[in-house]
Amino acid sequence: MKTEKLKKQLILNLPYVLLGLLATKLGEAWRMAGADASERLLHLADGLSLAFQSPWPSLQPQDLLLGIAVGAILRLLVFEKSRNAKKYRHNEEYGSARWGTHSDIVPFMDSDPWNNIILTKTESLTMASRTKDPKNSRNKNVLVIGGSGSGKTRFFIKPNIMQCTKTKGTSIVVTDPKGTLIVECGKLLAAAGYEVRVFNTINFHKSMHYNPFAYIHSEKDILKLVTVLISNTKGEGKGGDDFWVKAETLLYIALIGYIHYELPPDQQNFTTLIDMLNSMDAREDDEDYQNEVDLKFAALAQKKPGHFAVRQYAKYKMAAGKTAKSILVSCGARLAAFDIQELREITEYDELHLDTIGEKRTALFLIMSDTDSSFNFLISMAYSQMFNLLCEKADDEHGGRLPVHVRCLIDEFANIGQIPNFERLIATIRSREISACIVLQAQSQLKAIYKDSADTIVGNCDTLLFLGGKEKTTLKEMEELLGKETIDTVRPDRALSKVV
């Protein structure tokens, strides 16, 4: 370190040393030109020719003193000027932004082309979680924005699905808005060794079964399930007051808690929940009336007074008969979709095994309608449970990192409903070997669903791919991200004179 510093100082001061040595030759020429000042001025040219006959500097004391003085004065002048110099950013006066080149993205790409996230024809991002140079490390969350017909599915989703067939140790979860991706890519993934699973909310007869109750292991899981159910279904109640939502939440938690802890596994599903709600009724003129569910909870309270479900149900029962009837009506409206027999059957038991996606190569296709959002709450429910299950499994069984990276290609992200606490999940799933590729038509869609949390979600996506669009908010965001560039312009001026 000291050697480098000394070398730097020598290089910086070398010009002044050379100028000082040159000054010794000038001193020698002045001496050799004559005896007095007038004679030396007249014969200075002769003195210069005599002095420069030898390339070596003069070693006479007075010449050396002159050289040292000249070198020191020049060094002091340069130092003083640099100390008081103004700072300029030449060619960057209005901005330093510029268009990137291929060489700019190369440090972020993997040498193995199959181990990259495909962004464009020439740009990609390495899938490696630990890069050789830490400054080139980026999370694998990608935000894709493009208007209708911009090629989000064709040029981003499909190439990355096919890319995964050659990538070792990667599972994928794909939102399929039209049900075409499973047809076009399913056999390709199966041939590559993937276990393909399908949850189809368009045609239930072509779907595997999904039972959210199968992933309840604790009281907090019950709370998470109820939260995602409330967030993505209608029937908030009267007058826009969240009292009815909170009252419904208490009842859902109590009933699901009873189903989970007191009933056999084959009865732990939405069918049982709907049957319990249908067997409940309230009478305004008889506060002491007990329906079938009341009797079940009364018996449970005698046997287990501190039971989780009993405590929640007791809070619900504080409501008067008229209020309880309104709560039951709100619950019935919210869960009206489960009156469809096909939906009841598809949620009776579970075949998706969401908790195993991070342990073996799996391709899960979540098919939803792009014109009807009636059953999209099931998709958001599946995503919410999957993220929480995989994070818990990574922490509890795999030392904080899943053995198989899970990539979520969430096409039409704004149409699947709201995933509770997604702004927190997307900030933490990276360390568990989970990544999310969010596909939107416009950035305003994200703000419409997640409100103030939308900026947090965008901020946790290190990569932004813009495929074009006309939505003003999105265009303004892109303009701010691109910044400003200083451009030199040449304007020819012509002076026009009038001769009188």
Image (cartoon, helix red, strand yellow):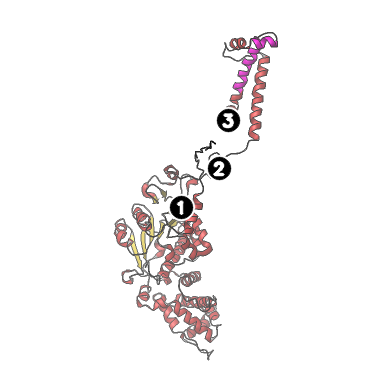
Q: Which residue is mark 3?
A: 8
- Specify the quadrant of the image occupied by residue 198: bottom left
Question: As displayed, is residue 178 above or below residue 159?
Answer: below
Q: CA distance from mark 1 to mark 2?
A: 28 Å
Give the label on residue 93, or none: 2
Upstream in the sequence, badge 1 or badge 2? 2
Residue type indicated by callout 2 = Glu
Of the 4 image quadrants, the one containing the C terminus is top right
Q: Position of residue 212 (x, y in %)?
A: 42, 70
Is residue 92 shown above or below 226? above
Callout 3 secondary element: helix
Instruction: Give the percent coordinates (x, y) of residue 367.
Output: 36, 66
Residue nearest the viewer, comparing 418 with 121: 121
The answer to whether residue 70 is above or below residue 443 is above
Distance Cα–Cα, label 1 vs label 3: 40 Å
Of marks 2 and 3, which one's residue comes earlier in the chain?
Answer: 3
Could you say which quadrant of the image residue 469 lies in?
A: bottom left
Amino acid under disc 1: Thr
The amino acid type, in three-letter code, at marker 3 is Lys
Tell me the tag on residue 463.
1
Q: Is residue 213 above or below residue 159?
A: below
Using the rendered image of the protein, determine whether residue 421 is visible from the camera's viewpoint: no
Q: Which mark is residue 201?
A: none
Crowd class of label 2 (few under 14; some 14 to 19; many from 20; radius 10 Å):
few
Whether label 2 touches label 3, CB < 8 Å: no
Dot 1: what SS? strand
- Position of 91 with respect to 375 (left or right) is right
Q: Quadrant of the N terminus?
A: top right
Residue 494 % position (x, y): 51, 38
Q: Position of residue 230 (x, y in %)?
A: 48, 72
Q: Which segment did they paint magenta?
A: 17-42
**Quadrant of residue 3 in the image?**
top right
